[in-house]
Each structure stands twice: as structure tokens, then as C-alpha cells.
Amino acid sequence: MLWLCKPVSSKKRFAPFRQLDKEYFFSLYEKAEHLPDEDWKQLCAEGSIFLEKEYLKIVESCGHSKLQSRYMIVYHKKQVCAILYFQVIDFKAGVFGDLITGQLDKMRSTRWKLFERYIDANKDEILLRLFTCGNNLVSGEYGFVFSEELSQNTKSKLLLGLMDLVAREEKLRGTISASLIKDFYEPLKPGTVFKKEGFSEFNIEPNMIVDIPEGVHSLEDYVDLFSKKYRKRFRGIVEAKQGLTEREMRPEDLLKYKTRMFSLYESIFENAKFKLLKLPEDYFIQVKNHFPEVFHVKGFFLDDELLAFGSCFTMPDGNMEAHYIGFDYSLNLKYNLYQNLLYSLIAEAIFKKSKWVNLGRTASEIKTTVGAKPHDLICYIKPQNTVSRLIQKPFISFLQPEPWIARNPFKETEVVNH
């Protein structure tokens, strides 16, 4: 481990320019509004929306009593060389009910049976405190940005050393059960450094990304690239939404339909395999108010009733990231709401002249039917107490993608099994 400096008391931990060694210093913050604009923007100005101060403020304002944010700026010889974003999340025992149920047949030990009884009797007690480098509300590499002037070895040592330091200082307020670094398309290097420090590498569900081919100027152009079978399927999906109106939702619409949108989103959340953090009811309004030009919400309406919505960001590089969606499960089959939402996002990406659109994780097989391809995501986790060591393997197993078959809508494309 790169032992940079010792933990300090709560009163001193947010003091500016704490010294790591002769060349490196850092400042730690617990509120995004306290971040010095000039220093933070040096490394994220051309980066992701999800590391911008305004978005981080929204995450803070979500009202999650179990979520705390931490921000760090690192300096090398007084020049900004890194920014890091951390989340500290407390999980109640009840969250792990599905995990235990799914693993009991494999783990018939006395220890596991005692653990199950403990969870049943203490569903509302805090069981695990997770320390994350990254954002648990979005999928992607949003935990840190390092200056390109630093070597890969220096970046990795700084990341691990600073995570260890902040995690140890968080123990002044509560026990850190596990540390997580998420989500990467390529393994972090050098891998031996992370393994030596007790981190295990594992995959979660892949991001499903649709590449927009050159010469495609409309959704019709895109679907023309499909085989006959999938063009027919597309027509059936579009016909299913006959009678519905699709339109961009303006700020006043987001306010008017706030409760309905939350209900539709919540139905998706409750069906999720692992329920992490629920959005607040005014989340979409807040995001639209702060990012009016790059955040878009499309709604599907039956007369004046909202049946489904999909949201997305136009990223700084011009490509698109699907965000949260919601739809009425009871009407999904009748109107093919989910797949129409997917095609709506692709149509928006084509209209914006994006090179690709990231449809996000989950429902991988369905997303391949509209042309998405999987891009694996890698995470790193380090257990730090008895509970996290006990559940690490079944927890990782629980998060592993279920077997699925990649469908291929395009002409003369091979089928790939996953």
C-alpha cells in the first residue's frame, strides 16, 4: 500500500491542502458547493456531466439518509493532478434478503443459517457500509479523473492510497464494511497492485450500446439495415403504440406529471434484481432545470395519461446516454412500451447525429433485438470485515449477469452466445 499519511480527526479531515508527501497534497470536501470551481473544472470540464458540480449537488439533494458524498482534489507541486468522487452508503439487513434466499441451497452451513435468522430479525438494522469510488446512481467510469502527465503506476497507487485513507477516516463515523471501485470497460492496471491490496475483480451486467452507422439519417434508415424478420418485428412494435402520442416533456410537464412519473419509475425500481438507491420524486425536474439543453425526457401518452417515459443525456462528445425510464407494466404488452422506448432513444440519437447511444445495463437480450451490443463492465471490491467477507462470493455471484443469447437484427450477422 502507498501509505501517504495518517488519518486525522473529524475536525481536521476537511482542512485544505493536507500533505501526502513532499510533492502531493489534497483537499477533501463533503459538499459539492464547497468545491473550488477552477480547480475541479481543470480535469472534468471536457469530461462527463456526471462529475459536474451541478449534477453532484442534485445527487446530494436526493434526500438519501443512507448516502453521503465525498470529493477530493489532489495537487502535485501545487498543480491539480486528480479529482476523485466517493459515496458512502449504508445498507439495511433487509436488502440482502433476496441474496440469502438465492444462495441458501449452495451454502447450507450453520453460519449461513444463523446469518439468515439475523437478517429476518433485524431487517431495518444497518448491516453493511459500502465505500464506493464512483457513482452508484449511474453506470460508467465516474469515480476519478487523473492528469495524463501521471504514470499509470502512480495513478493506481494514488487511487488505492487515497481510498484507504478516506475509508479509514470514515470509520470515525461508522465501520466501512467493503470498498468498491466501479465501472470500467478495461481492467485497471497494473492489476497486481489491486490484487495485492485485497481487491477482487468481477463483472456486472454489460452496458448495451447501439452504434449508429454512417449514412443513417432516420430511424427508417436504421431499420432498413435489419433482416426481413426484424423489420417485420419493428413494424409490429410501432403498430402497437397506435393511439399513443409521443412528445418531449417540458419543465412544466415534468412538474405536472411528477407523481405519475415517480410511480412509473418506482415500478421499474421495485422489479430490479438488486435495489440500491431510489430517486426522489423531484429528481427529473431538478436535472432538467440544471441541464435544460442536454437532458431530454420523452413521454408516451394516451390522451392526457402518461403511460411511459424515457430520459437521456446528450454527452459533451455528442453521444447519448440513456438515463432512467418508467412505464406501466400492466400496459406494456398491449402497447409494447419498453421496446418503443428503446427505439425512441435510438431515434433521438440519430436526430442528434450521435455516433452511438448507450442504452444502459439490464434486459440485455431484448436490447440486442434493437441492435445493441454488450460492452462488459468490470468492478473491484475489497471486503473489510466479517460480514462483507462472508457475503462477498455470493454477493458477486448474485450480481453476475444471467445467461442470455445475443440476438442479431442486422443482415448477415453472426449470433453470439453470452
Image: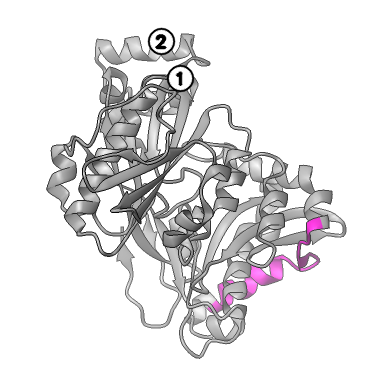
Residue assigned mark 1: 93
Give how far across and how far down residue 46 sits, in percent.
47, 67
At x 42% / y 34%, what residue is drawn? 15
Q: Within the image, what quadrant is residue 336 found in?
A: bottom right
Residue 166, numbered label: none
Q: Nearer the viewer, residue 221 or 278?
A: 278
Residue depicted at x 70% and y 60%: 335
**Residue at (31, 61) in percent of width and height:** 147
Residue denoted by label 2: 118
Identify residue type, mark 2. Answer: Tyr
Highlighted magenta segment, given as a residue range: 231-251
The image position of residue 229, as x and y in percent, is 50, 76
Along the line of sight, the residue nearer the viewer: 417 or 6: 6
Whether 259 is drawn above or below 99: the answer is below
Please name the residue shown 23% across and 48% down the image. Answer: 23
Say whether residue 397 is visible: no
- Is residue 336 positioned above or below 177 on the image? below
On the image, which quarter does residue 399 sit in? top left
Marks 1 and 2 sit apart, C-alpha to C-alpha, by: 8 Å
Residue 248 in the magenta stretch? The answer is yes
Within 10 Å of disc 2 (Cα), the crowding (few <14, some 14-19, many 20+) is some
